[in-house]
Image (tube, rainbow, N blue to C red):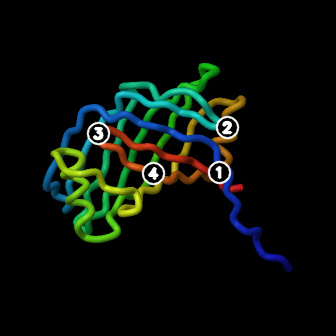
Amino acid sequence: MTGPPEVQLEYAFTITLEFGDIETLPDLTRGFARGALYLKGGEVSGPRLNGRVLGGSGGDWAEFRPDGTVATDARYMIEADDGTHILMRNRGFLWGRTPDVMPRMREWMFGDGPQVDDSEFYLRAAPSFEVGPGPHDWLTRHVIVGIGSRQRLGNTFRYHAIL
């Protein structure tokens, strides 16, 4: 009897997102705060998918947990270069590798603080997709993982399909 194959990743595409307006619901009765971050747009490029993120098509409704973790829940529309619309739901986590990272990240994002290096935080996502039959329906049959990088006004994720 043989075991399952080793995990193999195939780079599929990169998405660079540009953030728009942000709203916050602090101190919710469920014990955390929630933020709504709306997207202005973005670019999609790579060997398996190219196109753009449609501005105004969605955003991220993140939970700011008491343990310092941000649980992300983003939904937005991608328009592939061939005109196909693809709905993407991106769930993941952002947390600092040391206790001082998230406060410094907030100061960087919303104040005059210095940039926080990618090595100081964990930003990962596991998206799912909705698309009609055609050249992009491979997205609905693969587990995809994203490794993120933060910029002051957006995020960049490199997505890999697990083969």
**Residue 105 location in percent, x, y?**
25, 54
Residue drawn at x 44%, y 31% is 42
- Mark 3 and mark 2 residues within 8 Å of each other at the beta carbon: no
Q: Residues within 10 Å of mark 2 (few under 14, many from 20)?
A: some
Q: Find the distance from the CA under tag 3 to the CA under tag 4.
A: 16 Å
- Mark 1 and mark 2 residues within 8 Å of each other at the beta carbon: yes
Q: Residue furthest bottom?
A: 1
Residue drawn at x 40%, y 43% is 155
Q: Quadrant of residue 44?
A: top right
Q: Find the distance from the CA under tag 3 to the CA under tag 2.
A: 27 Å
Residue drawn at x 54%, y 47% is 158
- Which is in the foreground here, disc 3 or disc 4? 4
Secondary structure under the numbered disc 2 in the rendered image: loop
Give whichever of discs 1 and 4 has the lower sequence position.
4
Mark 2 belongs to which amino acid? Arg
Dot label at residue 37: 3
**Residue 63 location in percent, x, y?**
29, 54
Q: Residues within 10 Å of mark 3 (few under 14, many from 20)?
A: some
Residue drawn at x 30%, y 71% is 98
Q: Which residue is mark 4?
A: 148
Q: Which residue is mark 2?
A: 48
Mark 1 belongs to which amino acid? Ala
Q: Quadrant of the C terminus?
A: bottom right
Q: Find the distance from the CA under tag 1 to the CA under tag 2.
A: 10 Å
Dot label at residue 161: 1
- Which is in the foreground here, disc 1 or disc 4? 4
- Mark 2 and mark 4 residues within 8 Å of each other at the beta carbon: no
Q: Residue furthest left?
A: 27
Dot label at residue 143: none
